[in-house]
Amino acid sequence: MTLTNFEELKMWQVAREVTKELYQIVKNSPSFARDFDLRRQIFRSAGSVMDNIAEGFERNGNREFIQFLSIAKGSAGELRSQLFRMYDAGYVDEKTFQALNEKTKSVISMIVKMIQYLKKSSYKGVKFPNKDQKP
């Protein structure tokens, strides 16, 4: 199966779900909505996960995709840390925290698997074709 859009990537879909859930939490939690610093940081890192997966996919080259996936993985780690801060501050209950944390960990796992796959792939993309590969 060949993917033609980043929206088809499960890792992007799950990252989007996490981001949407975070927006709902802010919308329904006046105290979290007033914690401007944490709110801004958590939305930046959550958005960065989604955006770097999308941008890397659109670069049309495995090397660049791997680079952007690495950035997305780092942002997902940052997001996990911020989820702990959100939980410790009492903005979410343990069940919500665990669900968000597990989804974020699953995104990290999918990113790692995609990086491993891309490193082994003989297809390097249109920007960096192999000698045997037609552009």
Image (cartoon, helix red, strand yellow):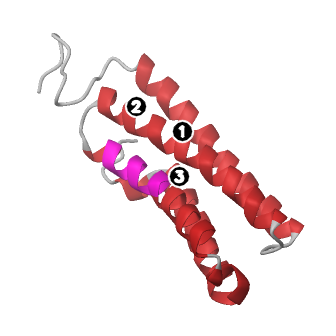
Asked if 37 appears above or below 34 in the picture, the reply is: above
Query: Going from the N terminus, do you reach mark 2 or mark 3 first?
Result: 3
Q: Which residue is at 75% across, 53% downward?
A: 102
Residue 10 is marked as 3
Q: Which residue is at 42% across, 26% downward?
A: 118
Q: In the rendered structure, which amino acid carries the disc numbered 3?
A: Lys
Q: Do residues under tags 2 and 3 come within 8 Å of each other at their CB atoms?
A: no
Q: What element carries label 1?
A: helix
Query: Dividing the picture into quarters, in which one does residue 84 lie?
Result: bottom right
Looking at the rendering, in which quadrant would you find the C terminus?
top left
Foreground tag (2 vs 3) = 2
- Which residue occupies the extreme left position in the image? 135
Query: Going from the N terminus, do you reach mark 2 or mark 1 first?
Result: 2
Asked if 27 appears above or below 82 in the picture, the reply is: below
Q: Count neighbours of disc 3 (C-alpha within 10 A) and say few if under 14, some if 14 to 19, many if 20 or more.
A: few
Q: Report the side of 31 relative to 16 (left or right).
A: right
Q: Which residue is at 58% across, 58% downward?
A: 14
Q: Report the side of 79 relative to 97 (left or right).
A: left
Query: Going from the N terminus, do you reach mark 1 or mark 3 first?
Result: 3
Q: What element carries label 2?
A: helix
Q: In the rendered structure, which amino acid carries the disc numbered 2?
A: Ile
Query: Dividing the picture into quarters, in which one does residue 27 lie?
Result: bottom right
Q: Is residue 29 visible?
A: no
Circle 2 is placed at which residue position?
66
Circle 1 is placed at which residue position?
111
**Numbered range of the magenta stretch:** 48-56
Q: Count neighbours of disc 1 (C-alpha within 10 A) and say few if under 14, some if 14 to 19, many if 20 or more.
A: many
Asked if 109 appears above or below 54 in the picture, the reply is: above
Q: 119 or 70, which is in the foreground?
A: 70
Q: What element carries label 3?
A: helix
What type of secondary structure mainly makes up the magenta span? helix
Cα distance between the residues tagged 1 and 3: 10 Å
